[in-house]
């Protein structure tokens, strides 16, 4: 599986975790009233789920697929901004 495909899978996973975090806050607010613990739980869920983002680096130069200059964006690059490598090509097979 290519780096881009794995990064896209991570982006969809993050969208799901974001939806779950919003639902956690909304249901807690609905049934128990405003709670800082619900917000803290949502933030912790998002931090833990987003930690793997830092591993989607270009194999040639090491630039992260989610960074556009100094900004982090929710969708990965299909090609590296620094060296131009196509991140959508699968790595060469190790079988001989």
Image (cartoon, grey):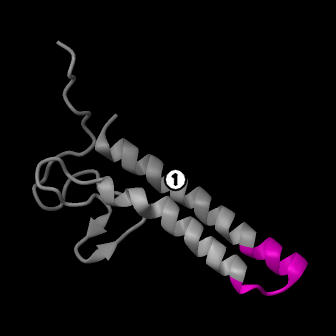
Which residue is located at x 49 percent, y 68 percent? 47
SS state under label 1? helix
Q: Which residue is mark 1?
A: 12
Q: Is residue 66 magenta?
A: no
Q: Is residue 58 above or below residue 35?
A: above
Residue 51 found in image quarter: bottom left
Is any atom of residue 75 visible in this view?
A: no
Q: Is residue 93 left or right of residue 10?
A: left
Q: Main secondary structure of the magenta part?
A: helix
Q: Is residue 62 above or below residue 28?
A: above
Q: In x, y percent, where is residue 55?
A: 31, 54
Which residue is located at x 20 percent, y 52 percent? 58
Which residue is located at x 38 percent, y 50 percent? 7
Q: In x, y percent, where is residue 34?
A: 79, 87
Q: Quadrant of the C terminus?
A: top left
Q: Is residue 91 left or right of residue 30?
A: left
Q: Is residue 57 above or below residue 67?
A: above
Q: In x, y percent, where is residue 50?
A: 46, 62
Q: Which residues are magenta?
A: 25-36
Residue 67 found in image quarter: bottom left
Q: Quadrant of the N terminus?
A: top left
């Amino acid at each position: 599986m290519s780096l881009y495909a794995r990064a896209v899978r991570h982006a969809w996973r993050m969208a799901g975790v974001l939806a779950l975090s919003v639902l956690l806050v909304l249901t807690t607010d609905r049934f128990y009233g405003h709670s800082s613990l619900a917000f803290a739980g949502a933030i912790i869920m998002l931090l833990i789920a987003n930690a793997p983002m830092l591993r989607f680096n270009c194999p040639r130069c090491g630039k992260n697929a989610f960074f556009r200059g100094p900004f982090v964006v929710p969708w990965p690059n299909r090609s590296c901004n620094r060296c131009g490598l196509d991140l959508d090509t699968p790595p060469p097979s190790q079988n001989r």
